[in-house]
Structures are given as C-alpha cells and as structure tokens.
Image (spheres, grey):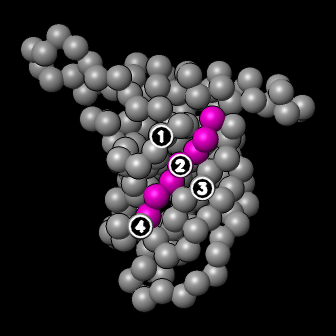
Amino acid sequence: MDRHTQRITLTVAAALVPLAVACGNDSADPGSGSVAPAPRLTGTAWRVTGVTEGGTTHRAPAAARIRIDDEGRASGSLGCNAFSAPTTVDGARIDFGALRTTRMACDEPRMTFERALTRALDSGTLTARTHDGALTLTTQKGARVQLTPSASR
C-alpha cells in the first residue's frame, strides 16, 4: 500500500473509531439528554494509568504516556524508557508494530510496569473501548491497558 493510500486509510479509520465506539457506549448521564463525544484514538495524548494482566493491576508511573499521531506513529513513555512504533488502526482495533525503545534502567516498580505495558502493546491486535472519556485497550488474552486523556498535546 502506498503512503498516500495508507494515510487516507488511517484518517478514515481515525474518524470512524469514535463513531463505532460511541454506538455501544452508554455513558450519558440519565436525564441529561446528551452523550459526550468519545475521545479520538489518534491525535490525542493519553496518560497510561495502569495495566491489568492475569488479575494483577500494575499502577502506572506518572511518566507513562502514549500518543498516536494522525499518520499512525505511536510515541511516548513506557514509564521509564521512551518508545516509538508504527501502528495500524482499523475501526476499534489497533496493532502496534515493533516498539523501538531507549534502554535506561529504572527502579524495579517502574521496570515491572514497563514490562507489563510492553507485553500488552506487543501482543497483537488490541481492542479500543471508551467510557466516560477514558480509553481501555484490551489484548486478545484479556490484559487491559487503562488510559485517560492527558493535558499535554
């Protein structure tokens, strides 16, 4: 697929993700008469708040962030090390390509979290779901990455 076609595909997919997710989202306040729009998966800076795998939730260090630009490139921090990766967004599904990371060593809690987040992002197709402005990425094996919109853009 040439670069122009890939950009168009990613742009269309990015525009459709909030619509697809909002169709199944019951986040309206009863009686409010309105539903808040779902946040965009691409073009939004996300703060990672935790990773749950095998019944254990790993709390994210404050530095953990993910941003996927409109051209399908992810970047951010795994909690200690910076990363970048190509992504493919297809509706509410996202695949992270090979993660390129720095190789700093941090304290054990941050490294434990970073390994859990890396396993989730490297696990194949993740399914995106929004609820009340937050985003959850779920792996095919049921691990979940919890994110909230970040103030930094």
| In the displayed structure image, the side of residue 64 where residue 31 appears, left or right | left
What is the CA distance from the residue labelled 2 to the residue labelled 3? 5 Å
User: How many other residues sit within 10 Å of disc 4, few (<14), some (14-19) or many (≥20)?
Assistant: some
- Give how far across and how far down residue 69 sits, in percent: 61, 41
Q: Earlier in the sequence, mark 4 or mark 1?
A: 1
Residue receiving disc 3: 75
Residue at 64% x, 81% y is 103
In the displayed structure, 19 sits above or below 47; it is above
What is the CA distance from the residue labelled 4 to the residue labelled 2? 13 Å
| In the displayed structure image, the side of residue 86 where residue 40 appears, left or right | left
In the displayed structure, 133 sits above or below 109; it is above
Residue receiving disc 2: 67
Image quadrant holding the N terminus, namely top right
Residue receiving disc 1: 44
Q: Secondary structure at mark 1?
A: loop
User: How many other residues sit within 10 Å of disc 1, few (<14), some (14-19) or many (≥20)?
Assistant: some
Task: Check the image and name the residue furthest to the front.
Answer: 152
User: How many other residues sit within 10 Å of disc 2, few (<14), some (14-19) or many (≥20)?
Assistant: many
In this view, the residue in front, 69 or 96, is: 69
Residue receiving disc 4: 63
Assess whether residue 84 is covered by the magenta stretch: no
Residue type, label 4: Ala
The stretch of residues the image draws in magenta is 64-70
